[in-house]
Image: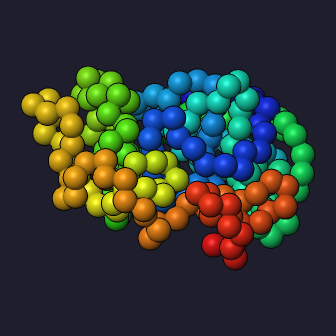
């Protein structure tokens, strides 16, 4: 796809409107863009000067072209936000939609490079993608029994879905059980301090 320009802005709190689990993706490489999340074009390339990164597009913004603060900081300055945090606003950057495989290294799903979705809270999105059997998500998803995108509740276990016979996943523990989950924290890098915090509690921790 031909490059287009967007005015990219920094975003420091991970979220996903479709239930992508932050503990299973690189939350420092996420795009929060105005377009609705698509079943196939979930990976974008963003470039500034001679630097470029691939970003996973798993959340919809209110209109801004937000990207993870660390990605914005690296593109703008060449440094991680944990090393040399910079403040600033919208910066004109070049973007292109790229094949989902270009974002494979951002998916931390036990080496499978599948999109990690919440078994309890992603079914609307997933059902829409399964209705497009050739779409990337339909062929590359994995369900976990984790309730929220910051991975504070549920069980870190994979579930199975017998689609279309069933529209609800089957998990080792009961589906949607709101157990406190502390083994898979999601970290945010705060803007503009560059501090690393646990997303669910705000607790400041060392850079990860």
Residue 55 spot, x, y in % from top left: 59, 46
Q: Would you place residue 85 above or below residue 167 in this image? A: below
> In the picture, residue 181 is in which quadrant?
bottom left
Judging from the image, the colouring scheme is rainbow
Residue 94 visible at all: no
Q: Residue at image x 37%, y 45%?
A: 118
Q: Residue at image x 65%, y 30%?
A: 61
- Name the side, left or right, on which 155 lies relative to 94: left
Q: How many marks?
A: 0
- Name the side, left or right, on which 166 lies relative to 178: left
Q: Would you place residue 65 above or below residue 53 in this image? A: above
Residue 81 spot, x, y in % from top left: 78, 61
Residue 67 spot, x, y in % from top left: 69, 43
Residue 137 visible at all: yes
Looking at the rendered image, the quarter that the N terminus falls into is top right
Looking at the rendered image, the quarter that the C terminus falls into is bottom right
- Name the side, left or right, on which 113 lies relative to 30: left
Q: Residue furthest left?
A: 165
Q: Would you place residue 37 above or below residue 102 in this image? A: above
Q: Would you place residue 208 above or below residue 199 in this image? A: below
Residue 29 spot, x, y in % from top left: 61, 51
Q: Residue at image x 21%, y 43%?
A: 169
> In the picture, residue 154 is in which quadrant?
bottom left
> In the picture, residue 19 is in which quadrant?
top left
Q: Residue at image x 70%, y 76%?
A: 206
């Amino acid at each position: 796809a031909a490059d287009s320009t967007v005015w990219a802005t920094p975003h420091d709190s991970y979220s996903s409107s479709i239930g992508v689990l932050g503990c299973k993706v690189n939350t420092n490489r996420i795009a929060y863009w105005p377009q609705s999340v698509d079943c196939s074009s979930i990976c974008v390339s963003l470039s500034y000067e001679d630097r470029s990164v691939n970003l996973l597009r798993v959340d919809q913004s209110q209109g801004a072209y937000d990207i993870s603060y660390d990605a914005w900081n690296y593109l703008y300055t060449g440094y991680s936000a944990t090393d040399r945090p910079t403040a600033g606003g919208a910066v004109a950057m070049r973007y292109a939609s790229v094949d989902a495989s270009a974002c494979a290294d951002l998916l931390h799903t036990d080496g499978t490079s599948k999109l990690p979705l919440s078994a309890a809270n992603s079914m609307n999105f997933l059902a829409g993608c399964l209705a497009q059997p050739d779409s990337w998500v339909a062929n590359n998803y994995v369900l976990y029994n984790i309730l929220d995108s910051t991975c504070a509740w549920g069980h870190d276990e994979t579930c199975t879905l017998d689609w279309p016979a069933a529209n609800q996943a089957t998990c080792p523990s009961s589906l949607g059980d709101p157990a406190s989950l502390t083994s898979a924290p999601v970290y945010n890098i705060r803007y503009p301090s560059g501090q690393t915090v646990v997303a669910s509690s705000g607790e400041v921790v060392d850079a990860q």
